[in-house]
Amino acid sequence: MELTISTVAKTEDKQYVRNKLIAYNYANFPAELKDMYEEVNLFVKDAAGQTYGGLVGEICWNWLEVHYLIVDENVRGQGYGKKLLMAAEDIAREKGCDFIKLDTLSFQAIDFYKQQAYEVYGVIENAGGHTHYYLKKNLLK
């Protein structure tokens, strides 16, 4: 049998790859962690329902990973980013997470995350001319 590499991205092909990796991971994690998966979606809104920012992430096994966190420029500096992170941390603790991880670029929010007690555990230089930081905050104290 001869196999080839294809660049055609069909939905079912992407789902196949995703499902295979999930099954492999599921078989190798401790039983008590296997069903720990939940999306975390938090939004900053006004009384009319207008969104001014938010945090999107997921709990996976014993951690929460923040994929996106942004607050609109016109309301930055008013504590909403910190409130979003604190709410996510509360959810993570309630769900039994040991830590939170996230990443940011040097022009984004590295100082903000450090102020919230996130520690850099990895760095990639020259990521589009910037530095890419990987951060973690332990929730077990």
Image: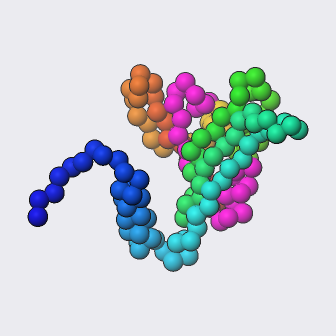
Residue at (28% x, 44% y) in the render: 7
Q: Is residue 130 left or right of residue 42?
A: left
Image quarter (top left, top right, bottom left or bottom right) of the C terminus: bottom right
Is 103 covered by the magenta stretch? yes
Residue at (67% x, 58% y) in the render: 92
Residue at (67% x, 64% y) in the render: 95
Q: Residue furthest bottom?
A: 31
Nearest to the observer: residue 62 or residue 70: 70
List x then y, in percent, for residue 58: 59, 54
Locate residue 62: give its quadrant.
bottom right
List x then y, in percent, for residue 129: 41, 22
Q: Is residue 42 left or right of residue 104?
A: right
List x then y, in percent, for residue 45: 80, 38
> In the rendered structure, which segment of residues is drawn in magenta?
87-111
List x then y, in percent, for residue 122: 45, 41
Locate residue 26: give its quadrant.
bottom left
